[in-house]
Image (tube, rainbow, N blue to C red):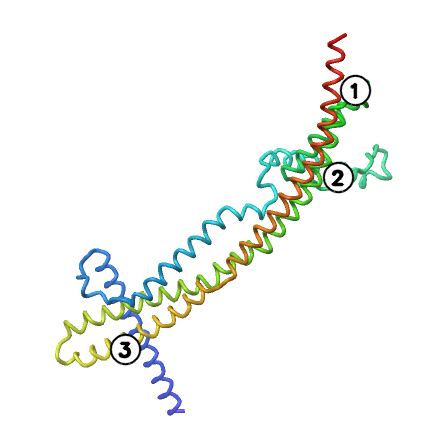
């Protein structure tokens, strides 16, 4: 038991010593960083890192910024309402209708068997996509229906043209939803993952190099001012810090090269373009087809108009 207590005491002292040493290094590094930031350290007293490392550091930083810049905009594809601001009013109206329907259905279920009149339950309408193409389709469909219900409206050419237009945009809207899903899964997810994993790992490796460099320069400053009794310990601290910086720099260089050589970002960008190309090609084809039909209606309507003017 006595041996165990001695061992435990030794381990405790060792851990406390290590913690105190880490705290001292961290404090010295913070002081060193502050002095450098305030210009209180001469340039020749700051350890110069290899040029290869500095070049790779700049390239990785540029890669990180490039990822963030494109993500800032393309994250819009995660929400299908990105091109249709008016969906907010529609959503509010739908919420009110859902509340009203909920109250009606509650009354229908709970007033059965009583003397009070029970309303008939109503079914919820099918959910509608909140994209601009779908909204255009619904608006054109409503306009066409309004015209067709007016006296003599069944033969109205504008109504027919609006029906064709509505059908084209409904198809385009459905493909737009497929486009957004493809962009999210084939581009956004891997693009964000590359930023959050490999690029961030390289960034953390760079941070470790910076901290190690600060510890080395702080140790060098300590060695300069160390008294005779502490000279040897301070010299060993500098040597250990030099070894640590070399090791961390080599690790960071390896990680940064791996990030920069990774072909996945270009592959992801290619998937984004493929999804966009499929969508816009389909939209162009659908609109081209319906435009030809509407042009025929336009020519016929203009001919009838001129005939009526001639008479």
Secondary structure of residue under mark 1: loop
Which x, y percent locates residue 266? 51, 57
Residue 102, quarter of picture: top right
For image coordinates 39% across by 57% down, the residue present is 61
What residue is disc 3 on? 240
Image quadrant where one finds the C terminus: top right
Secondary structure of residue under mark 2: loop
Which comes sooner in the sequence, label 1 or label 2?
2
Image quadrant where one finds the N terminus: bottom left
Nearest-to-viewer mark from 3 and 2: 3
Which comes sooner in the sequence, label 3 or label 1?
1
Nearest-to-viewer mark from 3 and 1: 1
Residue 172, quarter of picture: top right
Which comes sooner in the sequence, label 3 or label 2?
2
For image coordinates 50% across by 46% down, the residue present is 73
Which x, y percent locates residue 96? 67, 35
- Height in image: 15 above or below 161? below
Residue 148, quarter of picture: top right
What residue is disc 1 on? 150
Q: In the shown orientation, is residue 223 left or right of residue 176?
A: left
Marks 3 and 1, how far apart at CA: 90 Å
Nearest-to-viewer mark from 1 and 2: 1
What residue is disc 2 on? 125
- Height in image: 78 above or below 101? below
For image coordinates 69% across by 44% down, the residue present is 174
- Who is closer to the viewer here, 311 or 280? 311
């Amino acid at each position: 038991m006595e041996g165990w207590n001695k061992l435990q005491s030794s381990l405790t002292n060792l851990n406390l010593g290590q913690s105190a040493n880490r705290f001292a290094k961290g404090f010295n590094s913070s002081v060193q960083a502050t002095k450098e930031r305030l210009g209180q350290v001469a340039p020749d007293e700051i350890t110069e890192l290899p040029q290869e490392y500095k070049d790779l550091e700049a390239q990785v930083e540029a890669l990180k910024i490039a990822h963030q810049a494109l993500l800032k905009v393309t994250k819009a594809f995660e929400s299908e309402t990105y091109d249709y601001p008016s969906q907010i009013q529609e959503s509010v109206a739908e919420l009110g209708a859902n509340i009203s329907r909920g109250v009606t259905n509650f009354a229908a279920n709970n007033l059965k068997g009583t003397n009070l009149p029970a309303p008939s339950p109503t079914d919820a309408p099918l959910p509608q996509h909140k994209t601009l193409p779908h909204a255009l389709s619904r608006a054109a469909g409503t306009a066409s229906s309004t015209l067709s219900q007016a006296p003599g409206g069944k033969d109205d050419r504008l109504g027919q043209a609006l029906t064709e237009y509505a059908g084209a945009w409904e198809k385009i809207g459905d493909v737009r939803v497929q486009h957004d899903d493809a962009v999210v899964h084939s581009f956004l997810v891997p693009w964000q993952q590359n930023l959050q994993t490999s690029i961030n790992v390289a960034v953390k490796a760079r941070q470790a190099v910076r901290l190690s460099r600060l510890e080395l320069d702080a140790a060098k400053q300590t060695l300069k001012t160390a008294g005779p009794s502490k000279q040897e310990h301070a010299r060993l601290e500098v040597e250990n810090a030099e070894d640590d910086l070399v090791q961390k720099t080599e690790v960071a260089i390896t990680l940064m090269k791996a990030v920069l050589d990774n072909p996945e970002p270009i592959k992801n960008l290619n998937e984004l373009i493929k999804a966009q190309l499929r969508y816009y090609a389909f939209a162009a084809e659908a609109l081209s087809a319906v435009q030809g039909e509407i042009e025929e209606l336009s020519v016929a309507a203009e001919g009838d108009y001129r005939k009526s003017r001639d008479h």
